[in-house]
Image: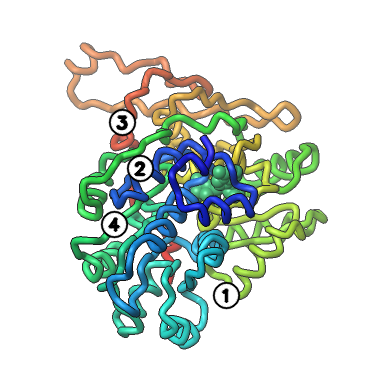
Amino acid sequence: MLFSELGLDNRIVQALENQKFTETTPIQREAIPYAAHGRDILGCAKTGSGKTLAFVIPIIARLISQKAMTKRDPRAMILAPTRELAKQVFQVTRDMARALNLKTALIVGGDNYNDQAKVLRKDPHILVGTPGRIADHLSDRSFFLNGLEVLVYDEADRMLDLGFNEQLLAIHRQADHRKRQTLLFSATLDDPKLRHLLDSLLNNPQEIMLDASYELHADITQTLFFADHVEHKQDLLKHELETRQYNQAIVFVATKADADRLSSWLQQTKMNCVALHGDLLQNQRANVINAFGNGQHDIMVCTDLGARGLDLRKVNLVINFDLPKHVEEFVHRVGRTGRAGEKGSAISFIGPRDWQSYRALSKHITQELPVQAHPALPGKFKGKTAKKKISTDQTKTFKKKPSSKAPKAHTKRVDNTSGTDIGHVPIKRKPRPEAED
Ligand code: ADP
Ligand code: MG
């Protein structure tokens, strides 16, 4: 379906065409008509499927068709979990808004606070930002939300999980009036534990659940290798980066220190590599993303700071040096490739410390995720057997023999298509380390 068939104002269709967007993606053709009519949206669609325009277009449509409720307050606000993602969403928003003479502003942590206050005094129509900094400006009364018509939560589950709840609630309360519309998007919204939070933010939403997180992206090839220890992982990494054909690669690691260490090590091996994590200063973070986005580096090593939303179209290889603790983050990490119909590859190294995460992942994902010994650099680790339960109750032990058949390292069940078991992933949720601002 074409954008011109969605009943949008011609100026919007023209602005899209000028940016070479003519055909809608599935989430866009499903969500835009409801959202443009003022309905709240709970939208779940795979990574790289065009969710940004699915909320930017209805914002613009509403703003140009309706009268503002107040003279000065922002009319729409888009929240994103990281500064990098907020900036990217801002660019998409600005490109559309400019064509319709709407003013936009980016409000993220790390940028100069007073400069932002000045920009806010110019009464932008649309704000894009991270919840922490926006909440700061709200509490300092740099702006008000009485006139807010549309509030968007991009990567909503991540923000709710990052410990932003207080700021999000403060924002929600200040804009809690009858006319407010809320649009909420992510590729991973099927965790039942999210439900009550989503319910409290949304008002009778149209639910558009196109892709479930337990079905991995079909355009991304998954390869998993056993690894014995960190040194073995480094050998595997070097080998893969030296022998594979790729344009650009992102390597995900567990900690900020690992990102620095691994990036320096790759540089020593003469690879063109850069590190991204939350301990860098804001201008360093911006420089890294700009330089990598411009193709100045082949490889970016990063923490989960880079897992969400980033649209770096030349990236066709993602390597999980460690598995993330949460299934959702795996989906988003590998989703940095295979965007907008492109193909991509994801490689994951599975060592003894990754085993529990691997088990949780393969339990959640419906697709087979076999782990193999690396053909050129095999190690010893072949997966862990499940620990036998030591029972003090002899009768029980006799009655029920502990299974000698350990869950196989490289096979998995494929029967879970209900998606309801995400709540049983045997890994406890804990606050993530990289909350913004
Ligand atoms: P998501 O938020 O779902 O991960 P994005 O909104 O970042 O995806 O979009 C992914 C890529 O697809 C971007 O490069 C964007 O420009 C492109 N894209 C979005 N909509 C369309 C469309 N209708 N036609 C072609 N490309 C599109
Ligand atoms: Mg996105």
What element does badge 4 sit on?
strand
Separation of disc 3 and disc 1 at Cα? Answer: 39 Å
**Sequence-wise, which precedes: disc 3 or disc 1?**
1
Is there any visible trace of residue 353 in the rendered image? no
Q: Which numbered disc covers residue 421?
A: 3
Q: Are marks 3 and 1 in contact (CB under 8 Å)?
A: no
Q: Which numbered disc covers residue 181?
A: 4
Q: Tell me if mark 3 has few (under 14), some (14-19) or many (20+) residues whose alpha carbon lies within 10 angstroms of its own.
A: some
- Name the amino acid, label 2: Leu
Separation of disc 4 and disc 1 at Cα? Answer: 35 Å
Q: Point out the frontmost of discs 4 and 2.
A: 4
Q: Position of residue 362 (x, y in %)?
A: 45, 29
- Name the amino acid, label 1: Leu
In the image, 93 versus 68, the foreground residue is: 68
Q: Which numbered disc covers residue 281?
A: 1
**Sequence-wise, which precedes: disc 1 or disc 2?**
2
What element does badge 3 sit on?
helix
**Sequence-wise, which precedes: disc 4 or disc 2?**
4
**Sequence-wise, which precedes: disc 2 or disc 3?**
2
Q: Which numbered disc covers residue 189?
A: 2
In the image, what residue occupies the spot 70% across and 48% down? 314
**Sequence-wise, which precedes: disc 4 or disc 3?**
4
Q: Point out the frontmost of discs 2 and 3.
A: 2
